Amino acid sequence: MFDNQKYITKGISQQISIYLQIIMWNLINELEIEKDYLQVFELSAENGMQKITHSQEMPPYEKSHLIKCEEPVTAKIFVIDDETHSTMLLAEEY
């Protein structure tokens, strides 16, 4: 899962830096448990840093990461795998 063509929506392209996009794709790739078709990322600012909380429903998983980032953003992002491609989109684009 998530080993196919990767796409982003217009909202992701306009609001989320390439740097953060790559980090989220890498967090999915490095996940060492069975991957759910829906990966969820909550982005927020914490002490001037970017907080990324990565979760999935089945099997249950949640982990937060703090990274240096010039302009932290607040957003909820879904990454969906439909077996032929994977798409990263803002929650409001769903």
Image: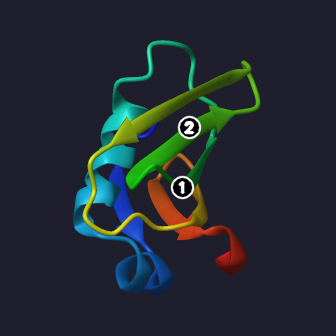
For residue 72, what is the image quadrant?
A: bottom left
Identity of the residue drawn at 63% across and 40% down: 37
Graded by Cα atoms within 10 Å as few (under 14), some (14 to 19) or many (20 or more), the crowding at tag 1 reads many
How many marks are shown on the rendered structure? 2
Q: Amino acid at mark 2?
A: His
Identity of the residue drawn at 28% across and 57% down: 69
Q: Secondary structure at mark 2?
A: strand
* Residues at marks 2 and 1 touching, judged by CB atoms closer than 8 Å: no
Identity of the residue drawn at 24% across and 66% down: 18
Residue 80 appearing in the image: no
> In the rendered view, would you say 81 is above or below 35?
below
Spatial distance from mark 2 to mark 1, Cα to Cα? Answer: 9 Å
Along the viewing direction, whichever of 70 and 32 lies nearer the viewer: 70
> In the rendered view, would you say 30 is above or below 73?
above
Along the viewing direction, whichever of 43 and 3 lies nearer the viewer: 43
Where does residue 34 sit, x and y in percent of width and height? Answer: 57, 17
Horizontal side of residue 54 vs 66, given as left or right: right
Where does residue 19 sit, x and y in percent of width and height? Answer: 23, 59
For residue 26, what is the image quadrant?
A: top left
Q: Amino acid at mark 1?
A: Leu
Q: Which mark is residue 54?
A: 2
Residue 68 appearing in the image: yes
Where does residue 23 sit, x and y in percent of width and height? Answer: 30, 46
Horizontal side of residue 62 vs 23, given as left or right: right
Identity of the residue drawn at 38% across and 86% down: 14
Graded by Cα atoms within 10 Å as few (under 14), some (14 to 19) or many (20 or more), the crowding at tag 2 reads many
Where does residue 41 sit, x and y in percent of width and height? Answer: 57, 49
Q: Secondary structure at mark 1?
A: strand
Pointer 1 residue: 43
